[in-house]
Image (cartoon, rainbow, N blue to C red):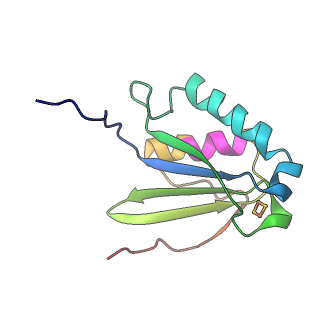
């Protein structure tokens, strides 16, 4: 049987904007620090028991409030989004931990959308 790519279970995907306005507010350092935190806390999807992915993104459309963080996850059969302004490492840790634990996403600095999004 041919071996395929390894599948890693993922509970949430975090995206941190790396466009110019957010980078001017430190999102590049935040991205690197967030990866170190995910590894240290064993939340990274490729760690045993971990489940969170982190990706650099382009502009997320809230440039004057950066660094901007978006979190996507599936919860109770629905896609849930959490969008955050002025993200920092403690906030990213709280979002990642809540996503991993399948608990409510933090409300601090969250700006939308207020309702879960239903997918077809
Ligand atoms: S530059 Fe980050 S949201 Fe636009």
Query: From this viewpoint, which residue is outermost toward the front?
Result: 2
* Residue 95 highlighted magenta (yes or no): yes
Residue 30 is left or right of residue 55, and the answer is right
Q: Is residue 82 left or right of residue 4?
A: right
Which stretch did the figure color magenta? 90-96
Position of 49 relative to 118 (above/below)? above
Q: Is residue 56 left or right of residue 46?
A: right
Q: Position of residue 84 (x, y in %)?
A: 69, 59
As displayed, is residue 63 above or below residue 5?
A: below
As drawn, 72 above or below 47: below
Magenta-drawn stretch contains 105: no
| Magenta stretch secondary structure, dominant | helix
Q: Residue furthest left?
A: 1
Q: Between 6 and 10, which is closer to the camera in this rendering?
A: 6
The residue that appears at 61% across and 52% down in the rendered structure is 15
Ligand 1 placement by image quarter: bottom right
Residue in the image at 84% along x and 44% along y: 26
Nearer the observer, 4 or 13: 4
Instruction: Name the residue rendered at 34%, 61% in the picture.
Output: 76
Quarter of the image with the C terminus is bottom left
| 22 versus 33 height, above or below | below
Give x and y (percent) for residue 1: 10, 29
Quadrant of the rendered structure where residue 32 is? Answer: top right
- Percent x, y of residue 20: 83, 56
Specify the quadrant of the image occupied by residue 51: top left
**Total numbered circles:** 0
Q: Residue at x 76, y 68 (%)?
A: 62
């Amino acid at each position: 049987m041919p071996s395929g790519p390894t599948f890693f279970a993922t509970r949430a995907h975090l995206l941190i904007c790396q466009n110019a306005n957010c980078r001017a507010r430190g999102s590049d350092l935040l991205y690197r620090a967030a990866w170190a935190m995910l590894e240290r806390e064993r939340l990274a999807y490729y760690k045993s028991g971990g489940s969170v992915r982190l990706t650099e993104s382009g502009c997320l459309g809230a440039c004057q409030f950066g660094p901007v963080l978006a979190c996507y996850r599936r919860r109770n059969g629905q896609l849930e989004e959490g969008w955050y302004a002025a993200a920092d490492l403690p906030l990213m840790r709280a979002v990642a931990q809540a996503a991993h634990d399948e608990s409510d996403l933090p409300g601090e600095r969250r700006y939308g959308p207020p309702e879960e999004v239903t997918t077809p």
